[in-house]
Image: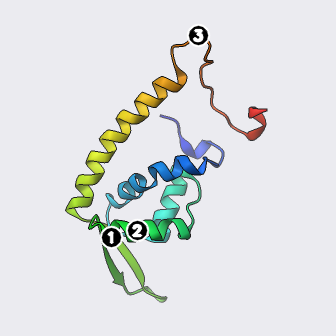
Amino acid sequence: MTDTAQLPPADWPGEWLRGVLTLCVLRVLADGPTYGYDIAQRLDAAGLGEVKGGTLYPLLGRLHTADLVREEWRPGDGGPGRKYYELTAAGRARLRRDAAEWARFADLTRTFVTGADADVAPLVPVTSPEALR
């Protein structure tokens, strides 16, 4: 597996991130309760790029409404309180199911996109927009 700390910052197409963001947020929460800013920081550190609050907090609200995440306000240490998010049993079950499905989908699309077709060049890592020109 590639060390993402050595890669340049990601600028993934928005539709790619939207397709996997829910699953990634559930994965972060599988490590234990945390707050929104920490979730965003961990997603960025994982190589997914910056996830803005206007995207993250509505997603967390939808997860809460679906009973996949529990919310709890906690007092801050010398500052304002924070809303912490924690997976419910249903959230853990969804994460297990969706992670398995995502792995299958990713394998399928990787095989399809890189293909065995002689007319399709094998994929090579793109490290900068200039490499696309």
The count of marks equals 3
Q: CA distance from mark 1 to mark 2?
A: 6 Å
Residue at the farthest left position: 89
- Contact (CB < 8 A) between labels 1 and 2? yes
For the residue pair 50 and 66, the one nearer the viewer reads as 66
Examine the rendering and report whether any part of residue 47 can be seen.
no
In what element is the residue under mark 3?
Answer: loop
What amino acid type is highlighted by mark number 1? Answer: His
Q: Position of residue 115 (x, y in %)?
A: 52, 19
What amino acid type is highlighted by mark number 3? Answer: Ala
Which residue sits at x=52%, y=36%?
2
Q: Position of residue 22 (x, y in %)?
A: 41, 56
Which residue sits at x=37%, y=75%?
84
Examine the rendering and report whether any part of residue 65 can be seen.
yes
Which residue sits at x=52%, y=65%?
55
Left or right placement of residue 97 versus residue 18 in this view: left
Q: Residues within 10 Å of mark 3 (few under 14, many from 20)?
A: few
Q: CA distance from mark 1 to mark 3?
A: 47 Å
Q: Position of residue 72 (x, y in %)?
A: 32, 79
Which residue carries the number 1 mark?
64
Q: Position of residue 32 (x, y in %)?
A: 31, 64
- Contact (CB < 8 A) between labels 1 and 3? no
- Please tell me which of labels 1 and 3 falls first in the chain: 1
Question: Where residue 118 is drawn, which disc sits there?
Answer: 3
Which image quadrant is residue 53 in? Answer: bottom right
Which residue carries the number 2 mark?
60
For the residue pair 38 and 124, the one nearer the viewer reads as 124
Q: Residues within 10 Å of mark 2 (few under 14, many from 20)?
A: many
What amino acid type is highlighted by mark number 2? Answer: Leu
